[in-house]
Image (cartoon, rainbow, N blue to C red):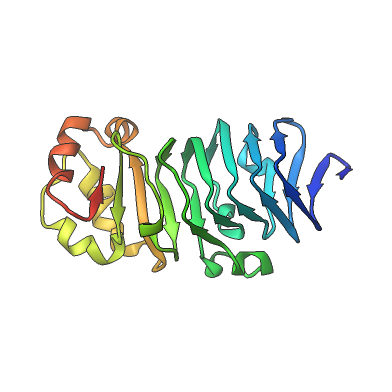
Amino acid sequence: MDWLGNIIFNDREIENERLELTDPKANYILGPNLILRNCTLVLKVSARRLSLKQPRFIDCTFEVKQELKNYQSWVAASLKGCRIKGRLSGCDFGYWPEYMSLPWYQHGSVEDCDFSEARLDSCRIMGSDPATLSFPKWPCFTILDPVHRAPELRRVSWPGIFGDVVVENLHKRPAPTRALTYHAPSVAKRMETTEEELKAVIEKFDCILF
């Protein structure tokens, strides 16, 4: 449905289709009452052009062609058995009903999903089990259970300002934060350090995947 610049997918089930969400002037709204199975979704829009209202994605592939920045609304979607590719920064996935009281934010989830071909930076898994997920390898790294592991991580010296900016504030993250993934080259530029210096510390912890 195309209405006043809004392209709406709702009240249906779509299977084995390729959806290209690439018009920079359109507002794409997915849901409510939308189920997509075995679909490929090509995303090339900014975060403000994409609205998720409790869609269910089952065995779908997301090809992110334009970096998706600061997009928390994944927590308004259910993802099971999906593959996510491309660059994402500041994005949240999973179950975080406290984020907003709107009804579609009460049903988010992420399970059995593969992020191994994504470049994640400052991305979080909320209220879902990260053990069912595949995370990207180095130069990305993933801190598991960061809120509860914060005291352990604070006991060592981190390079640059990563310790002061990130590690010292892990305990302030929302309680449902189950995993936190960073892109080391991006972190090194922001935090006045190098990838090598970061990795030397990361290697000391079994709660960090890389």
> Quadrant of the rendered structure where residue 136 is?
top left
Q: Nearer the viewer, residue 154 or 135?
A: 135
> Quadrant of the rendered structure where residue 54 is?
bottom right
Residue placed at 43% from the left, 35% from the top? Answer: 117
Q: Position of residue 81 (x, y in %)?
A: 52, 52
**Residue 32 in sight:** no
Residue placed at 50% from the left, 54% from the top? Answer: 93
Q: Position of residue 89 (x, y in %)?
A: 46, 40
Q: Which quarter of the image is occupied by the N terminus? A: top right
Q: Position of residue 106 (x, y in %)?
A: 60, 69
The number of callouts visible is 0
Q: Is residue 142 above or below residue 153?
A: above
Q: Is residue 21 left or right of residue 114?
A: right
Q: Is residue 86 above or below residue 3?
A: above
Q: Which quarter of the image is occupied by the C terminus? A: top left
Residue placed at 23% from the left, 61% from the top? Answer: 150
Q: Is residue 99 left or right of residue 198?
A: right
**Residue 65 in sight:** yes
Q: Position of residue 120 (x, y in %)?
A: 41, 40
Q: Nearer the viewer, residue 198 or 136?
A: 136
Residue placed at 88% from the left, 42% from the top? Answer: 4
> Quadrant of the rendered structure where residue 162 is?
top left
